[in-house]
Amino acid sequence: MSTALTAIAIILTAINLLTIFSFAVDKRAALHGERRTPESTLLWLAALGGTPAAYWARRRYRHKTRKQPFSLRLHLIAMVQAGIALGLASLMF
């Protein structure tokens, strides 16, 4: 069981690092008028487990903080993930 948890932790760490990197690249592109990272990509990264990094990167880079459809979708992803985590936790205890 600990091997599985270690693998999950490594995968989630990688996804979160990729999420931070993607937000940073998109912010830089926005500032320089370059090709942007699609919002759907940023949201998929959050949905795959990068939600903590997405919230951190939004604050750190002051990026995508006023985009209402994006913010709403990110909040919905976070709520679904919290519900799943609570459901899994209730099964364990």
Image: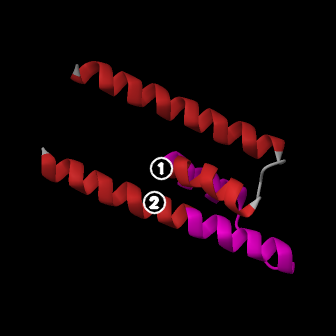
Visible in this render: residue 37?
yes
Instruction: Label the magenta part by its dominant secondary structure.
Output: helix
Q: Which residue is mark 1?
A: 48
Q: Sequence order check: which comes first, mark 2 or mark 1? A: 2
**Which residue type carries mark 1?**
Leu
Q: Which residue is mark 2?
A: 15
Q: Look at the image and tell me in which quarter the C terminus lies.
A: top left
Task: Please name whichever residue, 56 or 82, is drawn nearer the observer in this view of the structure.
Answer: 56
The image shows residue 38 at horizontal and vertical percentages of: 71, 62
Location of residue 6 with respect to 27 vertically, above or below:
above
Tell me which segment is drawn in magenta: 20-48
Q: CA distance from mark 2 to mark 1?
A: 7 Å
The image shows residue 81 at horizontal and vertical percentages of: 48, 34
Callout 1 environment at 10 Å: few (<14), some (14 to 19), or many (20+)?
some
Location of residue 41 with respect to 71 vertically, above or below:
below
Q: Is residue 7 left or right of residue 44?
A: left
Q: Residue at x 87, y 78 (%)?
A: 33
Of badges 2 and 1, the one in the foreground is 2
Callout 2 environment at 10 Å: few (<14), some (14 to 19), or many (20+)?
many
Q: Residue at x 84, y 47 (%)?
A: 66
Q: Is residue 80 left or right of residue 76?
A: left
Task: Give the secondary structure at mark 2.
Answer: helix
Do labels 2 and 1 touch, CB within 8 Å? yes
Residue 43 covered by magenta stretch: yes
